[in-house]
Image (cartoon, rainbow, N blue to C red):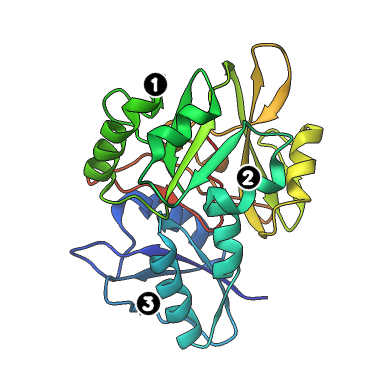
């Protein structure tokens, strides 16, 4: 099937991908992939071709933003590789956490925040890692709190620096992990990939069989007690692109630095696992 990668357009030169993705766009083009830039008005340059399958590589989109992207692609007669439902299956923590309860830290998600301190106190946990449905807070003291009464201040900071609380609030029980053991894996159509091509841990294959999305990442770290589970440290630490280049078996390009406006690079079904 014909594939096209779409990047956000440069603000001043809308026919070109944003400079943050220029090298990646060139790498795809050099390998024969079709490449387009998408401006803020929803126009593709070059235009999509009917029947193409489209992959998004750009700033992380909320559900409304990805829905608009799907509508724009389908309006051009093409199709997205990852549907909106599949995107949210890996993008929104409440979608995937229940499927992986045995291999990820204990998680509780809330949409009613009116009595959140009381609800956290009832959990009896020693520590809480707080995020919205997608992402944690990377500024200041971060997203980890030790007392339920700290949640209000944290959510105020999150709304200030993130610009919104997407979906609701997810609270994860803090576990002591070995940061040196963190490794990123990728899943494409149920197949698992490792950057060096070596064997993939069993936990990654378990995840691949449970999350209903064609294209996403899996981060694994070892607990202090030696157990291996899956976990995501946050986009701010995900600074490498898959070997720096795509290939015919390229499983992902969804990682990278946030820019000065706080936008985070993502690609399709990026699992935010914290």
- First along the sequence among labels 2 and 1: 2
Left or right, 19 with respect to 72, comes to: left
Q: Is residue 74 above or below residue 102?
A: below
Q: Which residue is mark 3?
A: 44
Image location (x, y in percent) of residue 87: 56, 61
Mark 1 and mark 3 in contact (Cβ < 8 Å)? no
Occupied quadrant, residue 242:
top right
Q: Which residue is mark 1?
A: 147
Image location (x, y in percent) of residue 8: 35, 63
- The residue sitting at the left extreme is 12
Q: Nearer the viewer, residue 77 or 23?
A: 77
Q: Residue at x 79, y 42 (%)?
A: 206
Please identify, in this view, whether the residue under mark 3 or under mark 1 is nearer the observer.
1
Image location (x, y in percent) of residue 69: 43, 72
Q: Residue at x 33, y 77 (%)?
A: 42
Occupied quadrant, residue 45:
bottom left
- First along the sequence among labels 2 and 3: 3
- The answer to whether one can see residue 260 in this image is no
Name the element at disc 2.
helix
Numbered label attached to residue 97: 2
Name the element at disc 1.
loop
């Amino acid at each position: 099937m014909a594939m096209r990668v779409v990047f956000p357009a440069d603000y001043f030169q809308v026919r070109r991908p944003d400079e943050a993705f220029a090298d990646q766009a060139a790498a795809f083009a050099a390998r024969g992939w079709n490449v387009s830039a998408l401006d803020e008005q929803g126009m593709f340059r070059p235009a999509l071709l009917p029947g193409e399958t489209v992959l998004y590589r750009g700033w992380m989109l909320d559900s409304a933003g990805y829905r608009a992207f799907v509508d724009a692609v389908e309006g051009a007669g093409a199709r997205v590789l990852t549907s909106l439902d599949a995107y949210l299956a890996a993008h929104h923590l409440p979608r995937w956490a229940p499927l992986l309860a045995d291999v990820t830290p204990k998680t509780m998600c809330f949409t009613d925040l009116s009595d959140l301190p009381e609800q956290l106190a009832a959990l009896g946990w020693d520590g809480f890692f707080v995020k919205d449905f997608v992402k944690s807070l990377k500024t200041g003291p971060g997203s980890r709190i030790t007392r339920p009464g700290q949640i209000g201040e944290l959510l105020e900071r999150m709304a200030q620096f993130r610009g919104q609380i997407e979906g609701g609030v997810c609270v994860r029980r803090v576990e002591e992990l070995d940061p040196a053991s963190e490794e990123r894996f990728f899943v494409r159509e149920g197949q698992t990939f490792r950057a060096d091509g070596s064997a993939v841990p069993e936990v990654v294959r378990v995840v691949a069989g449970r999350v209903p999305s064609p294209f996403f990442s899996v981060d694994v770290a070892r607990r202090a007690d030696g157990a291996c589970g899956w976990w995501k440290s946050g986009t701010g630490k995900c600074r490498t692109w898959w070997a720096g280049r795509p290939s015919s078996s390229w499983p992902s390009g969804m990682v990278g630095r946030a820019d000065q406006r706080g936008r985070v690079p993502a690609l399709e079904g990026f699992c935010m696992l914290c």
